[in-house]
Image: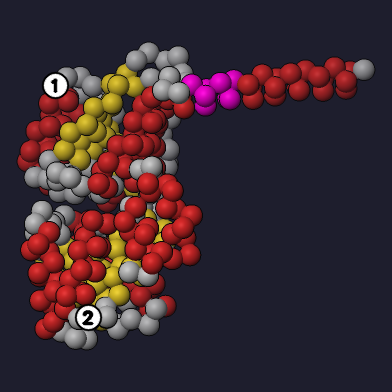
Amino acid sequence: MLATLLGAALAGCSSTGGLRAEKRAAQAASGHAAVNTPRMTFAMVTHSGDGDTFWDIVQNGAKQAAVKDNVKFLYAHNEEGKEQAQLVQSYIDQKVDGLIVTLAKPDAMKSVVRRAAKAGIPVITVNSGSAESKKFGALTHVGQDETIAGEAVGDELNKRGRKKALCVLHEQGNVGHEQRCDGAGDTFDGKLEKIYVEGTNMPDVQSSIEAKLQSDQDIDTVLTLGAPFADTAAQAAEQAGSEAEIDTFDLNAKVAAGLEDGTLGFAVDQQPYLQGYEAVDLLWLQRYNADVLGGGKPVLTGPQIVTKDDAKKLAAFTKRGTR
């Protein structure tokens, strides 16, 4: 009888917990908070330029978590380090409950991140700056280790038998981009060269890559560091009459289509939706329960090498803006 009663009690608890979990999930999906904690305000400030679709995906993740966690989500961006720091300071002055920032240009961001931490505002860094995050006073970093991601690219190029790669850097001064190229060069058995282009001027990007491919017939791989540049590189290769394989960092709908039809070789996905979602969720957990994930180490969201075999499965997710 005791066993029966215990079993019934446990089943009841399990059933109640399951119903509560289902209710919370339904609330989040319908645009209602899944928690009853007081309304908080979190702000994200990134180094994105205008029109960068990668950051739309990051924001989609952050916004979904914000709905679930009863958080008001604010977003601002500027590709210049000084202006990005000023945006962060404006949110410090507004006394937001949490900050999410990128450290693509860490020297410009160091002081303001430390000011936020000193003001009692928890900070999480995302996407870039894993090496500096803890030193600047952030709780943790969410993203991929850029050097490790680059090394994964070098390994993949070796598997594909590539001999000479061109790494296209579209934002000068971005330490993460340098780490990607350098990491690839460290593990790649062939030769890797860098080319710097003005990422805000796509015709210039295309003409620069095209000219390089025309002048160096030995280049058999072009590696771009952002999804929007992969298609441009493919057009440059076609115009140059080059058979170089186009590979890229990051994933979007066009990249998924390019992988599926063979225009692109592979992509390195760092799961930007996850970066936005986890950053907001971890800030909420810190404010609500003093939780810190990662034990002082970065919370890695990548790298994941995505090929033609994966493209069809991921296509639906890229179209809805979550991959």
For the residues labelled 1 and 2, the Cα–Cα distance comes to 53 Å
Residue reaching furthest right?
1
Identity, as a three-letter code, of the amino acid under mark 2: Ser
Q: Is residue 182 magenta?
A: no
Asked if residue 11 is positioned above or below residue 137 in the image, the reply reads: above
Disc 1 marks which residue?
93
The residues colored magenta run 20-27
In the image shown, does 41 or 206 lie closer to the viewer? 206
Closest to the observer, 263 or 266: 263
Quadrant where the N terminus sits is top right
Image position, residue 83 (x, y; %)? 7, 38
Q: Is residue 280 above or below residue 54?
A: above
Measured as percent of width and height from the top left, residue 97 is found at 28, 22
Dominant secondary-structure state across the stretch colored magenta: helix
- Residue that numbered label 2 is attached to: 242
Dot 2 alpha-carbon crowd within 10 angstroms: few under 14, some 14 to 19, many 20 or more:
some
Residue 154 seen in the current view: yes
Image quadrant where residue 158 sits: bottom left
Q: Nearer the viewer, residue 5 or 222?
A: 222
